[in-house]
Image (cartoon, rainbow, N blue to C red):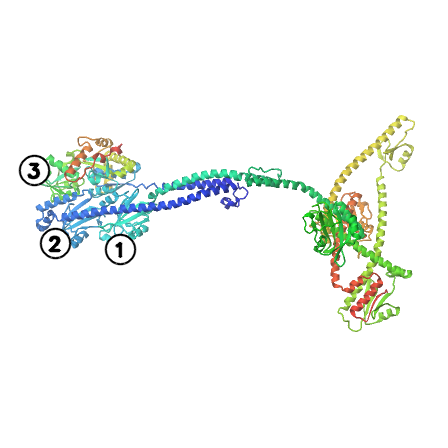
Amino acid sequence: MNTSNPAINPSQGVAALNWRNLNLRSKLITALLMAALIPLAIIAFISYQNTSQSLTNDANEKLLGAASSTAQALDAFMEANLDTVRYQAHLPGVTNYVNLPSNRRAGSPEETRLLDFMLAASYQDPVYITSVAVLDGKGVTLADTVSGNAGLDRSNRIYFQKVLATKLPYASTLEYDTLTGKPSLYFAAPIENVSGDVIGVLRIRYDASILQEIIGGDTGKAGEASFAVLLDENNMRLAHGTTRSIIHKSVVPLDAALVTQLQSQRLMPPGTPQELATDLPDFENGLNNFENQPTFTAELQAGGADLEQVAVTRMQTQSWLVVFAQTEAVFLAPINAQARASAIIALIIAIVVGAFGVFMAQTLSGPIVRLTQTAEAIAGGDINIQAKVETGDEIGTLAGTFNRMTQQLRDFIATLESRVAERTRNLELAGEVGRAVSQVRALDVMLTDAAELIRSQFDLYYVQVYLVNSSQTYLNLQAGTGHVGKELLGRSHRLPFNTSSINGRAAVEKKSVVISDTADSPTFKPNPLLPNTRSEMAVPLLIGDRVVGVLNMQSEVGGSLSTDILAAFEALAGQIAIAIQNATFLAETEQARAEVEAQAQRLSRANWVDYLDAIHKPEETGFMFEQNKVVPLTQSQQTQTAENGDALVAPITVTGEALGNLVVEMEGQSPIARTDELLTTVARQISQQIENLRLLDSAERYRFEAEESSRRLTREGWQSYVANASESMSYVYDLKEVRPLNGNGDQQAEDSGYTLPLKVRDETVGRLVVQGLEASDGESMSLANAVAERLGAHIESLRQFEETKRGQVELDKRARQLAAVAEVSSVSSRELNIEKMLQSVVHLTQRQFGLYHAHVFTYNEHMETLQIAACGWQEGEEHEGTHGTAAIPLAQEQSLVARSARDRKAVIVNNVRSEPGWLPNPLLPDTNSEMAVPLIIGDQILGVLDVQSDQINAFTEEDANIYTTLASQVSTALQNAQSFVRAQQQAERESTLNVISQKIQSATTVEAVLQIAARELGHALGAPMTIAQLSMKDKN
Amino acid sequence: MPNRFFRILSALIIVTVLLSACSGTDSASTEKLPLEVGWSLYPGYYPLVIAQELGYFEKYGVDVNLVFYANYKETTPPLASGLTDGATLVLGDALLEDIAEDIKIVLIADNSDGADQLIASPDIKTADDIRGKRIGVVAGTFGGLLVREMLATYGLSVADVKIVEVPPEGIPDAIPTSIDIGHTFEPFASQARAKGNQAIFTSADAPGLVVDVIAFRKSVVEERPDDIKNFINAWFDAVQYWQGNPEGGNAIIAKATGQDVKDVSFEGIRFFNRAENIAAFQPGANRNSVVYTAQLNMQYLVNIGLITKPADINEVLDASYLQ
């Protein structure tokens, strides 16, 4: 049931019965029901239509027949009475009396005979004939069976006038008594003399009920609930088979004027048009149109719920209509019976089909439903559940397939953990290899080591490294493992820089190529030297966007080098790329240095000394480019140039100190725009290159100093440890109390007592001194010895227990810290934005190591200061964003940070309050321990990682190792990022500098720099003379 | 969801089936109309007025609409044609062919016990006085029967007199101009006597001959037997009230019919209570049995040529609603 969603609900109420949401069983049963019931409904509908039509036709036939028959009966009544009144008017008893002169009539025998006749005539219908009368030719009543009417003048009555006019018998329409409204029907016939003159009128009056007698008597003639209605020419009902109350009322209200006229003619009873009418326009319309449509359907009684089927016919003797009607529902009753039967059949079919549907659903959807439940259980986490294979059809197959799928799912989940572990291990291995290779400076050695390390660590078949040559046309094999590597290296194996090979493709597309299984790969080309390769991977070595080479790995196990472990190798490749770059830098530096040395060797000893001192001491060295020749500048020329007013001069400065000038003598206007700018740029290039050369020397010196300092600090640390451990570990008992051993008094006592050594595993760790103990007192000695022995043993066991405990805690801590290091490392290697990267590192470090605070300082070479680049305050914390605000000069003595940077070594202070070299930070009042770890790449100090704890003795040597590892990761990342930044900056510079700059940079000696500068600048500017000069002489 | 779906589906099917099964039978009830009972001025019929005025019909749960006819003779055609459901009428008229075939006589209202009178002008005393005189009566009614009974009493026959067709209402005015003797009843009898005329024969002289009945159409009796029974119960209550409280009854009647209270009485009327009714419906050899009296009437009607095919008297008389 739907319990969770109140919205479809409704709206949802019935909306909840969305077909798509129904279960299979409901759909199946519904479909079966539809299939069974829809045809039945259609058949029932058609049958209903046909039956209804035929029943209606039948009813119409019967009604028309009944109406005709009733009309005939009425006509017969009329005709019979007309006949009767006609012959009676000619009976001698009547004519003789009327023929008498009026004065002889009263009391005459003719009168008696007339009265007898009239009485007899009234006996024709003793109930309905209410009067028989004889009128004279003037309309005066001569005799009437109703006493008191004799003598009344009837000449204005219609029957009298009609008979007089036509001389034929006449049947009146209904006439209403003007006083009582009582309706009557008159039959009249002329009384004629022998000459044929009308001398009187015989008239018979019928109570109008006679019509009702006839009409009412026919009720039911056309079937159950059928009845007749008689209407006059104004559609006023004269008789009604069922409803007495609407007799003498018209079907619709008549025009008021007509009503008044009819009433004056006694043709309507008294009353208003509304009182004398019903309002049934449909009936009226049907009646008015009956000549064309003798049967129709209409409501015959206002407020009656039933429609009547109506048949209309006209009488012969009167212009009256006979209507026969029957309630539709009655003659259509068989249809209802049929509908009931259909409905019962439908119900039975529905039940049978429903039961069948349930059975089918059970057989068909039952297994599916159970399979669905199984699937839901699995989705809910129970992967051990099995679907039951119940049938041999598709559903059974589905269940079987499903079981195989869940089996695979189980297997997959089972292997997932091991895969995760494996991948973690791969990453760790990659990190390890990366760290290892980053320590090595020589490119050949480093790459060879790296290849071998990767091969052994990942248990590969063969690993090789290609480097891209400078023109980007070939990939030169740089390192390869085993004898295959040696052989290939011996052949100077290389690959074209295009997509024809796996490695070429990786380099060109800057995308790793993985051939998980060589058997499945169309592109794999086997190397005859490496017949066992089953899986291969080529990872481009990228620095920024630049490909420097390709790391290629091959395995004997198919599928072992897959995209699964690609991430590890790509990380590794990144580290190797950086290492290559570093090594390249180093090699370039080495080469530069070698050239310097070579140059130096070429110089005479005196010149060499002078040269070395040249930067510090004023010396004048100069070259001049004149007439396409570079010649050393002579003393006289120097003076000359310096005084030439047309010359453009740019100073050559190193670290702000002007070392010389670059002078261009112009003759008139220079052909090159922005000559000044070019000159200045070239001068700056010269300065930079000179400074680079100088720094190279400094680097060598610093490295030596760093090694020296490292050795010194290690020794000092060890001594300090010993000193700390031996303090205040002596106690004395003087029969009163136990107290710590103090200087003088106790020293005497100690000397006078007997000393027993405290030994642990034959190692003397202390002593027990007892005063007054004699060596001869064997028992006391034995006791004292035993005590000393127990004491030693117990001290040892206590120490061991403490160590074990401490070891356990340490072990847990290490595990957490290593995990943190891995995380920090992972984060830092992903981020190229230095600021963001350092921020992530300090945050992670501070949180993961549970530190009070963490900073990273970066070293500014120019300022020689350490600046806070990132601090552990998080967003929203009070001191967030304080980084960059504090700068510590490298030389500052009172700073652990500065000290660690200077010493290139981690500095730990476990109680900062007692450390004079500690620089308190007012924002960090709770700092009790601090450790500063330098961020170093090779000899270069990049910065310092500074961590602080609010605990005393928070950091150990082991921690220092951990943090150093962390720092080395951060350093690599930092350098990587800085390289990236530098690469970007360099790209910008290169775009603005021209060929000159490049050529200047290629110079390896100061002389060469100055010569090239002078020549190239001279060429470019077309100046007659260009002088590049190093001179400390103040121009002024 | 499935439970709810099936509930709705089965509900739909059941509702459909029931709807189609019920249609056609649900509109069978018909409106119950009041019993339309025609009556005219005659003391024997006045208990109807009392029952109406005192609410006896409502008391018994029957809806009655009394239809008044100024002329007694007008009462019969509507009953015969079905324009009324029932009427008060004289036994003889109920036996006329057109009426008898459609009605059931369910109650004897009264016997005329002096109420019907033959009023004669003051000079008529003996049989000889009567001979050759004009007698006003409505032929074919009990009036004619009463005239025959009177003539027989005086040793005369219809052939000895001249029968003139005069309705009872016309008698006071018709004597002595157009007739010498006439049949009438109250209040016309008093009016006629007030002119100096005299009664020479009354229904008291022929006990059981003039019987007033209440008849209903056969179809109504068959369709609404309880209404008929309740109508009869109200009738007996009204008779009882009037007999037990003549002045109160007279006042009610006078007021309802617009007569002077002194003209209203049940003098000359013998009402039949329930037991007497039941007894009178038993067959018998004298006029105590309405069956016998009906046969007398029937013979008379046949004799004067008013009947073509006599009705079965036992069919017309029906005492079952008196039980």
What secondary structure is marked by label 2?
loop
Taking the spot 76% from the left edge, 70% from the top edge, the residue there is: A672
Q: Is residue A784 left or right of residue B184?
A: right
In percent of width and height, residue A340 lies at 39, 40
Residue B31, above or below A489: above
Categorize mark 2 by other alpha carbons within 10 Å: few (<14), some (14-19), many (20+): few
- Per the image, the residue denoted by label 2 is A197
- Per the image, the residue denoted by label 3 is B128
Of residue B221 and residue A761, the one placed in the foreground of this image is: A761
Q: Nearer the viewer, mark 2 or mark 3?
A: 2
Q: Which chain carries label 1?
A: A
Of residue A104 and residue A571, the one placed in the foreground of this image is: A571
Q: Is residue A280 left or right of residue A16?
A: left
Categorize mark 3 by other alpha carbons within 10 Å: few (<14), some (14-19), many (20+): few
- Per the image, the residue denoted by label 1 is A257
Count up the numbered dots.
3
What secondary structure is marked by label 1?
helix
In percent of width and height, residue B51 lies at 27, 38
